[in-house]
Image (cartoon, rainbow, N blue to C red):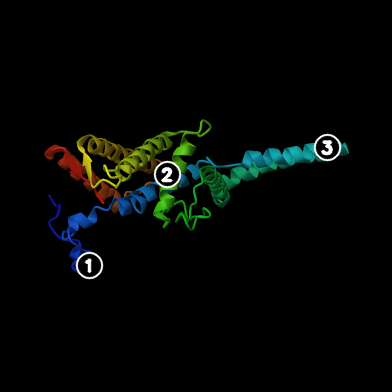
Amino acid sequence: NTLYTERPWTTPCPLVSVPGTNHEMIIAKDLFHLCHLGAVRGFVINVLCYMTSIDTFVTCFCIMWGTCIFFYLRVRFMKNLVAWSSTILISKSYKIDHAKSIEAGTNIPAKLSSAYSEFRSFCRDRKFYPHVKHFTRENLGWTSSRKFPECSFKGSDCRILLAFIIHVLEKPETTIDEIAESSYVAAKSIDDFLRLVFGNRDDEGCRAALLDRATGSRAALLLKLYLEKFMDCAKAAYGQQLCFFNLTPKYHYLMHVLMDMDEDLSSCGHKIGRAS
């Protein structure tokens, strides 16, 4: 058992002088940094990039048929047979170019632009105000197909992106494969977990410092399901030789949070402690 056998630093944290936080075990259990700025942020960015890679946000057919309609009207009003022939040729060439661009990966920026357009509409409809103003390879840390996506988005944007991912995966027209199915269950589980833990209030309306046994049990089950489904995503991506869903130290530490919750539930009376 290697738990708590040595401290991970040599210089004490300045927060240890705050009453009640004189032990690093208390300071370390920070769900905001473990989730919003940690494992969950990484999760939603990986889902977003994976869905982009399988053309979830592609609008090429709209562009292609828009081109067809334009030339059809040109034929209709100009009676120009040559124009109709050019419509067929352009449509066919567009399909060929699009297929080549997918193979070469050169159209990823366009796909990310389409993804952000859908995200922006989602936010506008719900009066969300994200700080992120565009999706690019650079701000998603997805500079190549051999690099795991990562970003430095704000914690509030993480929750908005999580809601967006759930929304997209629930759309009837979204293609659901093995990774997308596991991603959906993981997203719903961690969203419910965060709502339950951060939304739990005491009798005075303040955020509850303790969870009752029923709430704690449900929270532990939701966190466990998220961790399991994230692992399923990682295994499936690895099996397909895709660089998505890397297992990070903060994911590992969330497993310790779950272990602590299980221990509290097995030993406590009616209340268990909540991570900060």
Cα separation, mark 1 vs mark 2, equals 33 Å
Q: Which mark is residue 14?
A: 1
Q: Secondary structure at mark 2?
A: helix
Residue pushed farthest bottom? Answer: 11
Q: How many marks?
A: 3
Q: Mark 3 belongs to which amino acid?
A: Val
- Closer-to-camera residue (218/179): 218
Q: Is residue 114 left or right of residue 228?
A: right
Q: Mark 1 belongs to which amino acid?
A: Pro
Residue at (23% x, 36% y) in the render: 217
**Residue 179, image x and y in percent?**
41, 37
**Residue 247, image x and y in percent?**
32, 49
Q: Secondary structure at mark 1?
A: helix
Q: Which mark is residue 75?
A: 3
Q: Are marks 1 and 3 in contact (CB under 8 Å)?
A: no
Residue pushed farthest top? Answer: 172
- Mark 1 or mark 3, earlier in chain: 1
Where is residue 91, by image quadrant? top right
Closer to the observer: label 1 or label 2?
Answer: 1
Where is residue 262, by image quadrant? top left
Q: Mark 2 belongs to which amino acid?
A: Leu
